[in-house]
Image (spheres, rainbow, N blue to C red):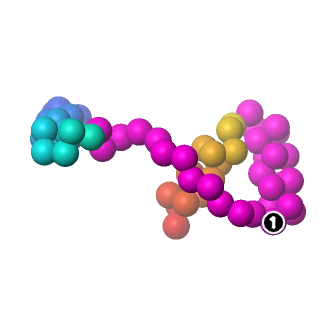
Amino acid sequence: MKQGKEVFEMLEVYDRTREWPIGREKLYITLSKKIIQKLKELSAKTGTPISRIIEESILKI
């Protein structure tokens, strides 16, 4: 039932804004070479894209 409510709310947002509240956008950021290397290593080890690693880390904050 909760999923139905969430879908209904998403449709309401779309009706008002004509934009889906879900999705992805590009963001250009500058990171140190050390951080980039760690992200690449973690990505290779887990098979998870770097963007997903960053998203999951931010959501934990």
Q: Is residue 2 visible?
A: no
How busy is the neighbourhood of tag 1: few (under 14 within 10 Å), some, or many (20 plus)?
few
**44 magenta-colored:** yes
Point out the stretch of residues depicted in magenta.
Answer: 20-47
**30 and 55: which is toward the camera:** 30
Q: Position of residue 55 (x, y in %)?
A: 56, 51
Q: Is residue 22 left or right of residue 3?
A: right
Q: Is residue 30 left or right of residue 59?
A: right
Looking at the rendered structure, the secondary structure element under dot 1 is: loop
Residue at (47% x, 41% y) in the render: 24
60 is higher (above) or lower (below) than 21: below
**3 and 39: which is toward the camera:** 39
Say which residue label 1 marks.
32
Residue at (27% x, 40% y) in the render: 19
41 is higher (above) or lower (below) than 36: above
Please state which amino acid type lies under the numbered disc 1. Ser
Indicate the quadrant containing the N terminus: top left, top right, bottom left or bottom right: top left
Q: Position of residue 29 (x, y in %)?
A: 65, 60
Residue at (87% x, 63% y) in the render: 34
Q: Position of residue 30 (x, y in %)?
A: 71, 63
Q: Position of residue 39 (x, y in %)?
A: 77, 51
Residue at (82% x, 37% y) in the render: 44
Q: Is residue 26 left or right of residue 6?
A: right
Q: How many marks?
A: 1
Q: Is residue 23 visible?
A: yes
